[in-house]
Image (cartoon, rainbow, N blue to C red):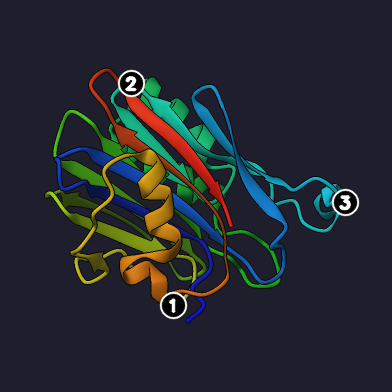
């Protein structure tokens, strides 16, 4: 099944909060997640820079940190969500206002914008989406070994039913591997690259994976 881009929020079996992002793409598969400091960006792979002239939506920051929170999204809304949280706005409000303001992508598919937020200090996570027909932001109670997710297509309604109850990653590197090919995510086609933030003792550990 092809579900497009995916964000997920969960808790490792050891009790660490995790926010994850996966690019699945048929139109622009020549992309990669790049880690620079505390930011992960999606960019064209070397030799495919001209893809940027074909779509304004294929390059963006996909993971950023805001204090005890990690934000993962499928587009340029990563930045305003992060800025609003850093300004003191509640996560629910930052997600809702940013998604509503930026709206779904005006491409050939009306691609929804999706977002996930994980808190390393509390067992709480958030998923949000803005589609052509709806804006939905939902809070989830996080428990060890469980991850909730939402995708741009098909699986595009954040709910307790979109869940992986066998989430067994234990660090950012294994979280990247998990979302591209393990558990429920192994059922979804055309993985390209992934990014993850997993809580540690003093902050979040970040990692990327290219298929």
Rendered image: mark on residue 50 = 3
Q: Residues within 10 Å of mark 3 (few under 14, many from 20)?
A: few
In the rendered view, tell whether residue 4 sits above or below residue 115. below
Q: Secondary structure at mark 2?
A: loop
CA gap between label 2 and label 3 equals: 35 Å
Q: Residues within 10 Å of mark 2 (few under 14, many from 20)?
A: few
Instruction: Point out the tag, 2 or 3, that comes first from the N-terminus.
Output: 3
In the rendered view, tell whether residue 77 sits above or below residue 210. above
Dividing the picture into quadrants, the one containing residue 110 is bottom right
Residue 81 visible (yes or no):
no
Dividing the picture into quadrants, the one containing residue 211 is bottom right
| Residue identified by numbered label 2 | 67
Instruction: Point out the tag, 2 or 1, that comes first from the N-terminus.
Output: 2
> Which of the two marks, 2 or 3, is nearer to us in this view?
3
Instruction: Point out the tag, 3 or 1, that comes first from the N-terminus.
Output: 3
| Residue identified by numbered label 1 | 154
């Amino acid at each position: 099944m092809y579900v497009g881009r995916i964000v997920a929020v969960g808790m490792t079996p050891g009790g660490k909060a995790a926010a994850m992002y996966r690019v699945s793409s048929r139109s622009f598969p020549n992309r990669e997640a790049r880690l620079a400091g505390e930011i992960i960006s999606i960019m064209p792979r070397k030799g495919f820079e001209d893809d940027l002239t074909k779509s304004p939506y294929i390059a963006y920051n996909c993971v950023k940190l805001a204090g005890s929170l990690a934000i993962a999204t499928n587009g340029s809304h990563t930045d305003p969500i992060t800025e609003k949280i850093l300004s003191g706005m509640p996560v629910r409000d930052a997600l809702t206002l940013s998604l509503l303001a930026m709206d779904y992508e005006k491409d050939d598919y009306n691609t929804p914008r999706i977002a996930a937020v994980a808190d390393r200090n509390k067992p709480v996570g958030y998923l949000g989406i803005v589609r052509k027909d709806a804006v939905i932001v939902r809070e989830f109670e996080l428990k060890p070994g469980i991850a909730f997710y939402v995708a741009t297509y098909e699986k595009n309604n954040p709910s307790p039913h979109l869940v992986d109850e066998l989430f067994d990653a234990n660090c950012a590197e294994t979280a990247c591997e998990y979302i591209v090919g393990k558990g429920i995510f192994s059922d979804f086609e055309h993985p390209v690259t992934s990014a993850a933030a997993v809580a540690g003792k003093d902050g979040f550990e970040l990692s990327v994976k290219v298929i």
